[in-house]
Amino acid sequence: LPAGATLYVDGRPTTGADAVRKFHTPELTPGKAYFYELKAEFLVDGKLEVEEKRVVVRAGDSVAESFPKLLAAAARGDRGPAVALGK
């Protein structure tokens, strides 16, 4: 995530504002799949950018997810507005 983005897990905001966040699930039943809805929001040049995804987890798994749309928007925003050059 871009540092400062807001991350929601199943509609609830998580704590922290770092680029890397950790979320620990409650104890999961082995052999069963669980779904978590993730939503990340980040303000870029005054516009709220949002990226959502559903993540599948199973007992004992470690899952890493990224938010490429938000990272790209943050990178574009860091460069400032585009300037048109004319003759």
Image (spheres, rainbow, N blue to C red):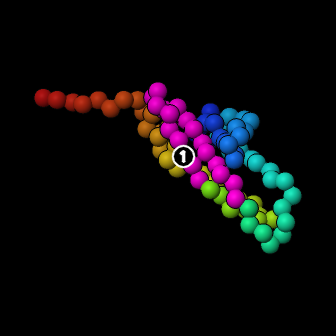
Q: Is residue 64 visible?
A: no
Q: Main secondary structure of the magenta part?
A: strand
**Residue identified by numbered label 1:** 51
The amino acid pointed to by label 1 is Glu
Q: Position of residue 57 (x, y in %)?
A: 73, 62
Identify which residue is drawn at 61% across, 36% down: 5
**Element marked by disc 1:** strand
- Front-most of residues 14 and 78: 14
Within-10-Å neighbours for mark 1: few <14, some 14–19, many 20+: some
Q: Residue furthest bottom?
A: 31
Closer to the camera, 75 or 16?
Answer: 16
Q: Residue placed at 70% from the left, 59% from the top?
A: 35
| x then y, percent, for residue 31 | 80, 72
Location of the C terminus by quadrant is top left
Displayed quadrant of residue 82: top left
Q: Which residues are magenta?
A: 35-53
